[in-house]
Amino acid sequence: MKWVYIEDISKYVGMEVELRGWLHNKRSSGGIRFLLIRDGTGVIQGVASKKDTEKESFSLIDDLNQEASIVVKGKVREEKRSPIGFELTINSIQVIQNKEGYPISPKSHGVDFLLQNRHLWVRSSKQWAILRIRAEVIKAVEDYLWNKGFLRMDAPIFTPSACEGTTTLFGVDYFGESTYLSQSGQLYNEATCMGFGRVYCFGPSFRAEKSKTRRHLTEFWQLEPEMAYAHLEDVMELAEGMVGYTVNRVLKKRESELNTLERDTKLFLSIKTPFPQIRYEEAVRRVNELGESMELGEDFGAPQETVLSGSFNTPFMITHFPESVKAFYMRKESLNSDSTLSFDMLAPEGYGEIIGGGEREFDRKELEKNIKSRNLPMDAFKWYLDLRKFGSVPHAGFGLGIERMVAWICGIKHIRETIPFPRMLGRVYP
Amino acid sequence: MKWVYIEDISKYVGMEVELRGWLHNKRSSGGIRFLLIRDGTGVIQGVASKKDTEKESFSLIDDLNQEASIVVKGKVREEKRSPIGFELTINSIQVIQNKEGYPISPKSHGVDFLLQNRHLWVRSSKQWAILRIRAEVIKAVEDYLWNKGFLRMDAPIFTPSACEGTTTLFGVDYFGESTYLSQSGQLYNEATCMGFGRVYCFGPSFRAEKSKTRRHLTEFWQLEPEMAYAHLEDVMELAEGMVGYTVNRVLKKRESELNTLERDTKLFLSIKTPFPQIRYEEAVRRVNELGESMELGEDFGAPQETVLSGSFNTPFMITHFPESVKAFYMRKESLNSDSTLSFDMLAPEGYGEIIGGGEREFDRKELEKNIKSRNLPMDAFKWYLDLRKFGSVPHAGFGLGIERMVAWICGIKHIRETIPFPRMLGRVYP
């Protein structure tokens, strides 16, 4: 008999199949037992009865506990009332392991307890749906870049010097040398994009932030593309194309997961590129209008982002931030301007920033001026300045925070559920 | 005029195009100037002459330095003698930046110098070819797993406890708590594979090895798939399928890069699954026969791997290692056996191990016995043991070292060239 996965079950209607999985839940009604069987690819209801099910198998059902591992044989049939459209008439059940006391019951638990049991919590329907969407999002953004000719060039995690202060960096003793875990692969992307034209890196980034907010992890995954011979508008177009493609793909391929999360997807259907763009000054004006105060020259904090982002039904972009809130490498709009060729993309519905990027300063003298005026150590940037010395060209890029993107798509408030094993202040277990 | 990439040049024969790139090299012959132009996707020869080229453009060619950034307009024509089959008749050249003194000339340099200038070295033909093959290998292995239904589930980098001794681990002060950078995502994969059936993680792994060998980096990338309801033979089949697919895809899509590396690809053409399999005992016998001594119960060192792997023309697998050389989680062949359900895949031609994996112990009592007999801290494995307590099933997986795989495919001796920014003992710059 053929071992099949529940996600492929529609191909086996009327056939006898074998499922290998776990007991998700069960109930009984008269002489009939209903088993919710999950196998990692989906959940199906199996129906056992004295008529259809082997006697020995039927008799052990009442002793099966939640998360018992079971191999179930039976016949697939269409069933309109099933969420997946199919049910299994159970012939036999083989029990691999069955133990009482699975700690996560369908009743509700505190989040600390669930995080402490994250190694088991990932099996629960909602977490399962979120992480399957995460996997789709990651594959989608990488496929999108690959199909546009971008090559993956991994940036290093160990970085030699603290370019912009060490307060939010994790230090590592590297055989007696002091190094730091990377917060971004961008500077390295700028080197590889001069060799390969269009590159991206995708890896974990680390931020030693002591704040406990729903938008921060100490370890998060960032996708960072960088293009040579490109300007602000080129990477804005790339960013909106990528986000549009990804949302569409998740809608198509992860519809049942979005249903499990009870995500209202009406808004997604109306997302179209190009996304709305507003300049920084206009964004500040709107924030104040929406009842959160902020001054020109300041950065958006969480409350400001939330109200502004809540006033949109589609991802949108804020452009031309003042240099006071952006990094030293941002190119200015014009030589004496205070505005930079930068953008943030914010998700709507109050979710806030998912992407930040812009055009990099490619003139060596301007870049040196920026480094000096911010009192950064010129020495640490020796290799980075080389990129402006030899074959410097206009270039631009951005960084996408995977967890923030997944949180928005899934419609969940806290990004700790968007990564298999979240790392936060006070949380490195399991 | 249309900006095109050199990799797409065959579509533009007879047409005027714009290339944006860098001057790779040049020579002159009489009144003609030959410019090797690279744009990150390939290299094309541009031919300038007084007849075809604007006067101003022609006159500046003699002052152009290696790696000058230039925008070149011209007409594409077929040219049989060209390595890519096409040349460009140059109409005009716009210089973006041009500076003397690019440190990496076509003459040879010492490897320390090159590593110190890695941010520029990636532009050199050979490094460019290697890293483009690396990008193809990574996309190939991920596509392969995705198409087989595997979902990416990122394992954490910060891990709470040192499961198997701390001598090769990098420690990190995590807000006062002592944590370590992950050497492998396997234990976490074992948790997620019980939730998702088939999973993999792909990320940087860290090993604080003080040895300077051509096969070790302190920061390397590992792809680790894990399957629930799977046995040794299932993951061996998966591994050989993946390696076969990847080699074929590189042969097809990165032919010119392999040529640049002067890689002899004859062997690749004869690679067929299934790969040869030999048991550990037979492998030890052969190693001794090949002139390297080793005893039963010992692990293969670099010299042993090299001679054995040199005697094969295809990747091959060593199976059933004794428990003395494998980790505590390896399942035994039978209860009282000393052999484990493990395998290593070795690349031929002396390259050695590229994959290691096997079946995991899924019986809680056996696993606890292994932990105790090796004097490992039972506490650290509390969550890991939970996986054997609730819904335990046979499962298996493996880890593929990306850099070793790339080194073999590229035919290069030292893996430091297979990653954009290698990290080794004494090397964290740039």
Image: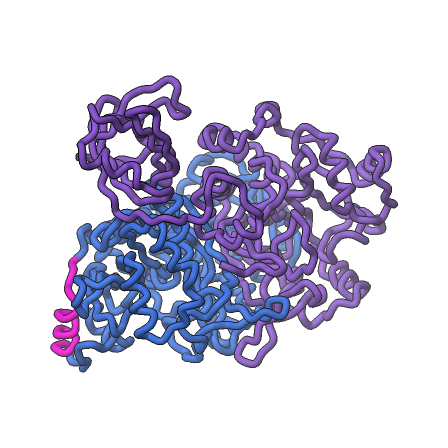
Chain colours: A purple, B blue
Asked if A145 appears above or below B23 in the picture, the reply is: above
Q: Is residue B109 left or right of residue A162?
A: left
Residue B151, image x, y percentages = 40, 44
> Image height check: is B16 above or below B233?
above
* Residue A233: quadrant of the picture: top right
Q: Nearer the viewer, residue A20 or B1?
A: A20
Res A217 → quadrant = bottom right
Camera sees residue B119: yes
Q: Residue at x 30, y 37 (%)?
A: A62
Q: Residue furthest top?
A: A80
Q: In the rendered view, does B343 fall on the left or right side of A219? A: left
Tell me residue B169's x, y (percent).
47, 72
Q: Position of residue A356 (x, y in %)?
A: 67, 46
Q: Main secondary structure of the magenta part?
A: helix
Where are the magenta residues, as a range?
B276-290
Front residue of B235 and B414: B235
Residue ID at (34%, 55%): B388
Q: Is residue B277 magenta?
A: yes
Question: Residue most toward the front?
Answer: A30
Q: Is residue A228 left or right of residue B10?
A: right
Examine the rendered structure and indicate whether residue B247 appears above or below residue A246: below
Would residue B316 appear left or right of A418 to someone viewing this image?
left
Q: Position of residue A60 (x, y in %)?
A: 25, 39
Image quarter hosting the N terminus of chain A: top left
Q: Is residue A38 magenta?
A: no
Task: Identify which residue is drawn at 24% across, 29% down.
Answer: A90
Q: Report the front residue among A282 and B329.
A: B329
